[in-house]
Image: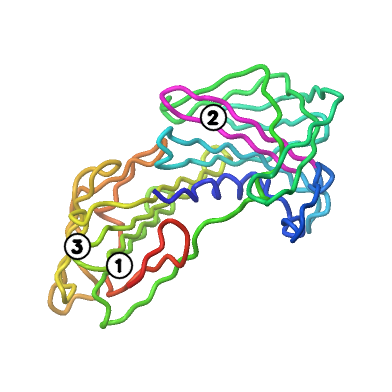
């Protein structure tokens, strides 16, 4: 499984340490003053096997004035997907407040410990980070759609803000053209008040299938981004060499199947079936009215990291 899903939550919470604070060639020391503005980060365990990561950030130096946001990233325990909820917030050195509408609220006051703690930045080769431990007290509540998960606390532990020091992962790219043996099936839809996109890649008939899918929507003033990605067995995506037909029949978190065919003189391929994907907190149809797809010869490549591949 490709574990870059945390990027969605970090984008909403804007918690990444600025680029100027990346690790130096020799060991260096960082502390909370290296993060401009005010930041909050903590975690809760939700019901039904979900974990919740809360992050809020306020930077008065941003173009356009002080912009404060709170993000809640909800993960399955198996890390097979994420749902990230974002809303305006009030963030200061001593408190954080945000209204998540029907999804909950955050109203916390910081209780510092009055002491400093220095910890190693494990990915940096010797750098350290110093922060003041403490807790937030008040109320934090979250309720997922139709009760898929919930969490409530009156006290949470402050987490050190070192997330942005260790960004990593593998680079990826894609080549296309009739000479490639592989195929890419890509789809999109703007029906039902959301933006859905998905993609399946396979480099050859016996190769594994890479998939990724996202949904963006807005409900009750809260922006919601859902994402899932990973690898599927070769049988999940089949196509003929000239790409006249293709079939998707993937296992969980998918259900159902879908078929693509090209009719003579048709502007686009015909796409039918009952294929659906179980995102975190929402199930979405990937086939049916309003879903448009394309199928082309392509090859995906991971340049480094544990998932390195070649065409």
- Tell whether 5 sits left or right of 130: left
Q: Main secondary structure of the magenta part?
A: strand
Quarter that holds the C terminus: bottom left
Q: Which residue is drawn at the image coordinates 31% and 45% (left, top)? A: 277
- Tell whether 63 sits left or right of 309: right
Mark 2 or mark 1: name the one nearer the start of the chain: 2
- Distance, label 2 to label 3, CA atoms, is 44 Å
Dividing the picture into quarters, in which one does residue 122 lie?
Answer: top right
Task: Say if mark 1 contacts mark 3, CB within 8 Å.
Answer: no
Mark 1 or mark 3: name the one nearer the start of the chain: 1
Q: Which residue is drawn at the image coordinates 50% and 30% (left, top)? A: 51
Q: Secondary structure at mark 1?
A: strand
Q: Which residue is drawn at the image coordinates 80% and 46% (left, top)? A: 30
Q: Residues within 10 Å of mark 1 (few under 14, many from 20)?
A: many
Looking at this view, name the residue that lies furthest to the right: 114
- Distance, label 1 to label 3, CA atoms, is 15 Å
Q: Is residue 54 magenta?
A: yes
- Tell whether 216 sits left or right of 311: right
Q: Residues within 10 Å of mark 3 (few under 14, many from 20)?
A: few
Q: Which mark is residue 184?
A: 1
Q: Which residue is mark 3?
A: 206
Q: Position of residue 158 (x, y in %)?
A: 71, 29
Which residue range is magenta in the image?
Answer: 38-57
Q: Position of residue 235 (x, y in %)?
A: 18, 55
Q: Which residue is mark 2?
A: 103
From the viewer's side, name the closer residue of 295 and 157: 157
Mark 2 or mark 3: name the one nearer the start of the chain: 2
Q: Position of residue 256 (x, y in %)?
A: 19, 45
């Amino acid at each position: 499984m490709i574990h870059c899903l945390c990027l969605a939550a970090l984008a909403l919470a804007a918690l990444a340490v600025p680029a100027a604070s990346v690790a130096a060639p020799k060991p260096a020391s960082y502390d909370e003053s290296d993060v401009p503005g005010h930041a909050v980060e903590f975690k809760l365990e939700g019901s039904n096997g979900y974990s919740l990561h809360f992050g809020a950030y306020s930077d008065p130096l941003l173009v356009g004035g002080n912009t404060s946001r709170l993000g809640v990233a909800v993960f399955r325990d198996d890390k097979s997907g994420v749902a990230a909820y974002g809303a305006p917030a009030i963030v200061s050195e001593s408190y954080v407040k945000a209204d998540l509408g029907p999804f909950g609220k955050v109203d916390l006051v910081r209780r510092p410990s009055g002491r400093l703690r220095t910890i190693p930045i494990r990915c940096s080769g010797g750098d350290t980070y110093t922060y003041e431990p403490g807790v937030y007290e008040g109320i934090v509540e979250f309720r997922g759609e139709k009760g898929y998960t919930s969490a409530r606390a009156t006290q949470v532990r402050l987490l050190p803000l070192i997330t942005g020091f260790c960004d990593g992962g593998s680079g990826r790219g894609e080549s296309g053209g009739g000479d490639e043996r592989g195929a890419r099936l890509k789809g999109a839809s703007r029906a039902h008040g959301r933006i859905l996109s998905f993609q399946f890649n396979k480099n050859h008939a016996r190769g594994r299938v890479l998939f990724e899918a996202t949904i963006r929507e807005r409900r009750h003033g809260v922006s919601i981004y859902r994402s899932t990605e990973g690898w599927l067995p070769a049988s999940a995506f089949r196509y003929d060499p000239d790409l006249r037909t293709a079939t998707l029949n993937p296992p969980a978190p998918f259900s159902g199947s879908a078929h693509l065919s090209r009719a003579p003189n048709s502007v686009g391929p015909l796409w039918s079936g009952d294929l659906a994907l179980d995102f975190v907190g929402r199930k979405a149809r990937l086939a049916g009215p309003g879903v448009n797809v394309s199928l082309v010869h392509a090859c995906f490549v991971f340049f480094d990291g544990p998932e390195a591949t070649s065409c």
